[in-house]
Amino acid sequence: MSEINYFFEDIDSFEIPDNISHWIKNTITSEGKTLGNLNYIFCSDNYILEINKQYLNHNYFTDIITFNYCKDNVVSGDIFISVDTVKSNAKEYKQDYNNELNRVIIHGVLHLLGYNDKSETELFEMRQKEDFYLNLLP
């Protein structure tokens, strides 16, 4: 059975609006894929730093780490999101916190759908897709 789960590590839990799961599912199906199992783990900077060190050998903070478990057209993965970094990025880019959080939520899904952001061209395409799907959020 396919599902989207939300977990909280090293932070207080918060309400995830019902429309977010529906929006994520619609994003996946509109890209021609099927939802498998997605786990969102919202966490602190320190928690994501440890994940970054342990699994990716990176010693720096980040807003998101995505582990891809997709098979064929079924989208599955673990998406770690540092709410601390999302908050600082929202402030730095003069964005509403919830908008920035939604951007990061869909950013992880886009990675699982095959979009990357390593080159300037890839980053441009990723931002366009983020904006497109953010505009579809009810």
Image (cartoon, grey):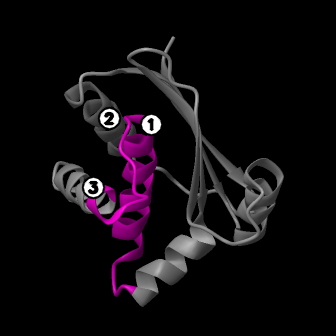
Where does the image place residue 35, in percent across and percent down from the top left? 41, 22
Q: Would you say 38 lies left or right of 23 here?
A: right
* Mark closer to the chain start, 3 or 1: 1
Magenta span has 118? yes
Q: Which residue is mark 3?
A: 130
Q: Quadrant of residue 24?
A: top left
The residue that appears at 51% across and 11% down in the rendered structure is 1
Q: Which residue is mark 1?
A: 112
Where does the image place residue 13, in percent across and percent down from the top left? 65, 56
Where does the image place residue 66, in percent across and percent down from the top left? 57, 46
Query: What amino acid is found at the position of numbered circle 2 in the picture?
Result: His
Where does the image place residue 90, in percent across and percent down from the top left? 42, 80
Front in this rendered view, residue 92 or 115: 115
* Mark closer to the chain start, 1 or 2: 2
The stretch of residues the image draws in magenta is 93-122
Query: Label 3 vs label 1: CA separation?
Result: 13 Å
Q: Quadrant of residue 67?
A: top right
Magenta span has 62? no
Q: Residues within 10 Å of mark 3 (few under 14, many from 20)?
A: many
From the image, give the main secondary structure of the stretch colored magenta: helix
Q: Count of labels shown?
A: 3
